[in-house]
Image (spheres, helix red, strand yellow):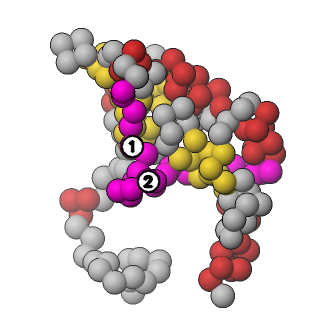
Amino acid sequence: MSRHFDEAMGLSETHDPATHDFVFNQTMFRIKDPERTLKFYSEVMGMTLVKRFDFPAMEFTLYFMAALSPEQAEAISEDNEERIKQTFAMPAMLELTHNWGDEDKDEVSYHNGNSDPRGFGHIGFAVSDIDAACERFEKMGVPFVKKPNDGKMKGIAFIQDPDGYWIEIFTPARQPGLLKEHLA
């Protein structure tokens, strides 16, 4: 029996016990202006700042954001050392990295991976109702790359954060039907 739930070339059936406690912890984005980006991720996307680290000697700050339910947020420790441990053990964090002074430099911008040369593409957020979420984003003035009814792949959207990174928006319950249309 395979340890994978689907098939693809290159998969290994070996699952080294040394990896059993590995946790995919973070994706890092460089950000130009922390005030506008933190506002976006906390207000628009509902994320919570779990931990901030300032590195004065190297002139940068890290902001670790998570999409937490109110119940999950209650479990975050007030104790600094315990919260540091929680930060680096939690799955699917967004690490926003601000190099001090970038907000004042017109020439500073970051490649989002979606123009040539292509590379990184996007992060994704599952929402309970994509139409309601996109209506809310539109009212908030969030830039869209693709709305749910645009293009060939209906039912998913892409918005942009203040630094131009793409965020896919989708409703999990709708995915089987949407994928069935395109995989047939």
Does the image show residue 174?
A: yes
Does the image show residue 98?
A: no
Q: Quadrant of the C terminus?
A: bottom right
Q: Residue at x 74, y 30 (%)?
A: 140
- Residue 84 location, quadrant: top left
- What distance separates the C-alpha of mark 1 from that of mark 2? 8 Å
Q: Amino acid at mark 1?
A: His
Label 1 close to label 2 by CB (< 8 Å)? yes
User: Would residue 93 appear left or right of 167 to someone viewing this image?
Assistant: left
- Which residue is more in the foreground, 126 or 166? 166
Please, what is the dominant secondary structure of the magenta stretch? loop
Q: Residue at x 39, y 43 (%)?
A: 111
Residue 83 falls inside the magenta stretch:
no
Q: Amino acid at mark 2?
A: Ser
Q: Quadrant of the N terminus?
A: bottom left
Residue under label 2, please give it: 115
Q: Residue at x 68, y 70 (%)?
A: 152
Residue under label 1, please give it: 111
**Which portion, as a residue range, is magenta?**
107-131
Does 93 appear above or below 60?
below
- Residue 171 location, quadrant: bottom right
Question: Secondary structure beneath disc 2?
Answer: loop
